[in-house]
Image (tube, coloured by chain):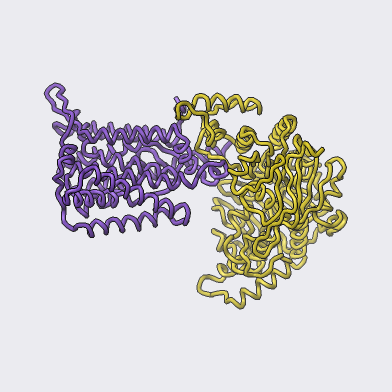
Amino acid sequence: MKKQVRLKIENISLVIACVLFVLMFGAGAIHYDHFGSLSTFLNLFNDNAYLIVVATGITFVLLTGGIDISVSSVVAFTCVLSAYLLQLGWSAAVVICIVLVIGLLNGFLIGYCVQELKIQPFIITLASQFLLRGMCAVVSTVSIPIENNFYKAAALNKIAFKIGRTNAKLYLYVFLALAVVCVAFYVLNFTRFGRTVYAIGSNELSAGYMGLNVKWVKIGVYMISSFCAALGGVIFSFYTLAGYSLQNMGMELDAISSAVIGGTLLTGGVGNVLGSVVGVLIQGVIQTIVTYQNLNAWWTRVTIAALLCLFIVLQRIISIRADKRKGGH
Amino acid sequence: MENDLILRMEHIHKTFPGVKALDDVEFSLKAGEIHALLGENGAGKSTLIKVLTGVETKDSGTIVMDGREISPKSPIDAQNAGISTVYQEVNLCPDLSIAENIFIGREPRKRGAIDWKSVNEKSRELLKEFDLYLNVEESLDNYSVAVQQMIAIARAVDVKAKVLILDEPTSSLSTQEVEKLFDIMRMLRERGMGIIFVTHFLDQVYQVSDSITILRNGSFVGTYAADKLPMLDLVGKMIGKDFESLEAIPKLSGEKKDAEELLAIKDGATNEISDVNVSIAKGEVTGFSGLLGSGRSEIARLIFGADKKTSGTTFIDGKEAEIGNPLDAIKRGIAFCPEDRKKDGIIGDMSIRENIAIALQSKRGLLHKVSRKEADKIAQELIDELAIKTPSADQKIKNLSGGNQQKVLLARWLATDPRLLILDEPTRGIDIGAKAEIQKIVVELAGRGMSCIFISSELEEMERCCTRMFVLRDKKIVGELSGDEISQASIMKRIAGENKA
């Protein structure tokens, strides 16, 4: 309702992403037994709920034209610290609050450095990535199991369906992830904060001249990204029921490529969170196919990185063409 | 009369390191008035505007708006005080819709959420007042600069501004678009808004302005009623000398010297232009004349090897010469000052010396370093010769005024001692005084035997400087003039496509 269908980069790549998803899922369903089922589809959500949350958060940063490569370490640190504190007997509520606050704080520091000290986001989030990854090892170098009852309940509680003869299930934490997506969608499309995010990505100088609060929105997006990474970490610790310092190495690539495949421009100003969710699902399908095919798990990475390159090039070509068309008038 | 005064700035001082940008400047604006703010580049216009809009803070002085003293610290402050600005480069967000560009930051909301329906409706209504009927949900970058500018004005007006500042609004508009803009300005004046109009185009000042304030070298010269100040006096006050001295520049286009040919292109073509046959003589100023986009710059880029040649031959001194890229051209003594000095020319954060030495260095190759002593000497010589106004060669080039930056660029190429100097719009956006100086330098250089290609939109300076001229229309050379044939009328006729004068 807000915007009519405009043939813009955002829409084109979102359509391409959806088509790609359907094609891949379809190909899997034809090729493998048991693939083309509701259960496989829902498992994409079960297995990637944490990534949906992280990708949603990072979309905010990408929309301003920034980048955050610290998210994988935030996820890992959240898991390790949670596992450690729970082992010491802390209550689940307190632990979750602590890790979320750490996420917010990390985001604030990054945002502050980017906005006030004018440090390149790539550099400062690289520093944060190594810092937090190192902190994981300081807390524990071995994997710590989580035996807290709340965590176990969160890990196991699910809604089961039975359609025909197939069983399908959806874990409760998936709903948490979907709620995050809904809130993010609302914020980006219907609040001044969200629109300012787009304005900054489109032209930061103009946004300032138009009297928008560039400073706090820019700090805000890094806080959102880091907070979502911490929340993703909480969901990931439900999922694995353990904390290990080498978990999720390189996951920032997954998050960034989800957003890009879903139509977010790395230069900012264009994109939306629904696209990022589709991007995550595409990665899920790739992963499932790799598993079915019994390939080395690294093939997932290779394929995703190749897709990322393809989409970035595609975006550039589309926008160069658009510029040319305009120049022609 | 005091009553309808909405803005008064008094005793404004502002100093930048080494430069007194504003020295005891005053300015006042009445409601329902279009007030032109004029001055050469570096006179302090932009600084005054920046102080007023909170981009810079003043050192001392008072700004009184509607009887209350204000001291804006940011554009938001200024906006809240009722001062809106539309900058030269339109400052909107190209990826957002038109409606959103008008309303972002103050969107109508319903239960906390942005009410897109009313955002769009209100924008449509607002634009109707400007006679614009657009699809407001489309993104801004689908529209021309002219439309974007109207939208920027619409936004500025709708924030309930009492003072609207238009900073060089007409520089990228066509004549019709300028007319439309003026209609809008007049309409806003009727509504009682005070408009500050900053421009380089003096004709336009008289078309719309009620009063004129002139600054020179950071000082206040005076405020005059537009109908009581003839243009000649206006120019005199801007440059601080009378008009006669400007006219006294020798008109070089005297008799055509039968000079030897330095460079020629036969049947040259690039992807942009074809059928290029030109010949450049030694010690002459050759002009490429035509409208913007007629192919003037494309020929220059072809000669310099900046655009890939698809066919044709280049001759230098009568011998075939292969110029495949700019480095070939530089090595053969061709220098090129491009059109957009901010984008292609100056390196803002480097010193004047470094900016001058850089082309010499690239001509010599990376292994033969231009020594500091040599660079110092060359820079100082050229600073003196071209009268570049700067405290020292160590000054960062971005701190200079437009005219002086242009001179540094000229110096950069002169340092390589070129045989052919190509100047693409060397006087655009710089003030009359600096313009005259640059024209004089070009003519003098040619007198010393250097060949020069001069490209400019201003026919008057083309007439003054060139001894030979190629006229272009729609990417084709449509005429060649030399010596006394060159006059503004004859150029114009060829541009307009009348076959023979």
Percent coordinates x, y for residue B57 in the rendering: 63, 53
Camera-nearest residue between A263 and B267: A263
Percent coordinates x, y for residue B370 in the rendering: 57, 74
Res. B461 visible in picture: yes
Tell me if B31 is positioned left or right of A146 in this view: right
For chain B, give the colour.
yellow
Tell me if A11 is positioned left or right of B330 in this view: left
Which quarter of the image is occupied by the N terminus of chain A?
A: top left
User: Which residue appears at 66% of the width and 28% of the height?
Assistant: B130
Residue B381 in which image quadrant:
bottom right
Please identify the residue farthest to the top as the structure is shown: A164
Percent coordinates x, y for residue B192 in the rendering: 73, 32
Percent coordinates x, y for residue B213 in the rendering: 78, 47
Res. B467 visible in picture: no
Chain depicted in purple? A
Residue B85 in which image quadrant:
top right
Which quarter of the image is occupied by the C terminus of chain A?
A: top right
